[in-house]
Image: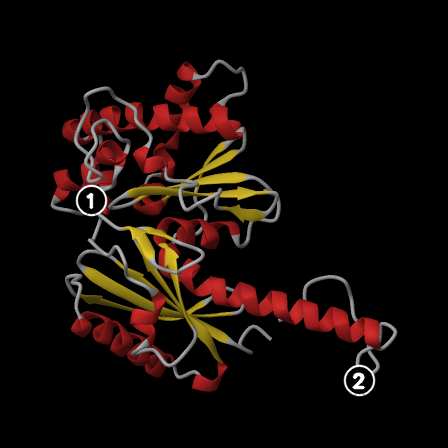
Amino acid sequence: MADGRFSVGVDITRDRVRCLVVNLERRVLVSRRTRREFERSESYVEFVGHEVAATIEESGVDRSLILGVGVAVPGLISESTGKVTYGRVIDNAGLSAADFARYIPYETRLVHDSEAAGFAEFWDRQTVDNAFYISLSKSVGGSVLIANGMYRGDGELAGEVGHMRIHDHGLRCYCGRDGCLDPYCNSGVLAQHTDGSIEDFFEGLSAGDPEAVEVWERYTSDLAIAVNNIRVMFGCTIILGGDVGAQGGSHLGDVRAKVDRLSFLEAPAETYLVPCSFTEHPIAVGAALYLVDEFRQNLDTALSLASRGSGGRMADGSRATDGPPDQ
């Protein structure tokens, strides 16, 4: 059953916390957004714990059915230590799941926000085995799917497209270097022209607002460089996600046309460059889905072992299948 278990996802940014509850089929039961400036303090992690508790209470689900809590943050996270090893976006280097777990009475996992967004997007794509997800939000990041599994490389750097250098002596990035993709293609580059609203920017663009058209022209020229480089390196489907991908899908043709002009291949960008399909709080949902995925894998393993031990028949006499369990 889809509502047999539940998971909690938390998305932490510089100025707010989103917390939500999902079931085993990725459906969001309740979502809660609270403004709070990030700070390195005990009171902040305690606040996040209170938000998790309040969200679970609002959802009305039985607490015993909560699998755990995934906390997504901007920053590179070590798989061996579970700590943020690079966290300049919100100055969270050294933060760990254990810090949040002091106020969260469930299994707690810390995940990279861009990878979480990609995980939510990849979750329901049955026809794509290899893909690169570009997260175009307040910062630029990415995640990589290879052979239907998340690829993290030898460290924590796989997918960090925001730090691909696209211009010599270019704009200063938050990482301290010049010319990275991030300062050219984060969502703020567009939203700053409409009082911080990415939705209003695309409304103006659709209406032919001259300023929006000019800004979009520069933005897409820079984004096309990154897309072309990713395509050359990975040769796979490329998904534009984050705030820009979610809002700007109808204007994707502008990006595709510029990618085609850069590409040495004849295959048009419309065959591989697509907008994201999952747009409902993908970072928080993706963070929650790590616990759901682990539960499903463990259940599959248990069913397989039970099947082999009973000659393929379960305790009730039914025959186990090799496919995923009916949740």
Direction from residue 184 to residue 259 in the image, left or right? right
Q: Amino acid at mark 1?
A: Asp
**N-terminal-most mark, 2 or 1:** 1
x and y percentages locating residue 150 in the rendered image: 52, 48
Q: Is residue 20 left or right of residue 168?
A: right
In the rendered image, residue 295, in percent from the top left (x then y), is placed at 57, 70
Residue of label 1: 200
In three-dimensional space, the C-alpha distance between marks 2 and 1, rounded to whole angstroms, equals 57 Å
Asked if residue 244 lies left or right of residue 207, the reply is: right
**Residue 187 position (above or below residue 96):** above
Question: Element under label 2?
Answer: loop
Q: Is residue 281 among the parts visible in the rendering?
A: no
SS at mark 1? helix
At label 2, the amino acid type is: Asp
Q: Is residue 199 visible?
A: yes
In front of the other: 175 or 60: 175
Residue shown at the point (14%, 40%) measured from the top left: 192
* Marking on residue 316: 2
**Residue 63 placement (x, y as % from top left):** 43, 85
Residue 22 position (above or below residue 61)? above
Q: Would you call the spot at circle 2 few (<14 residues within 10 Å), some (14-19), or many (20 or more)?
A: few
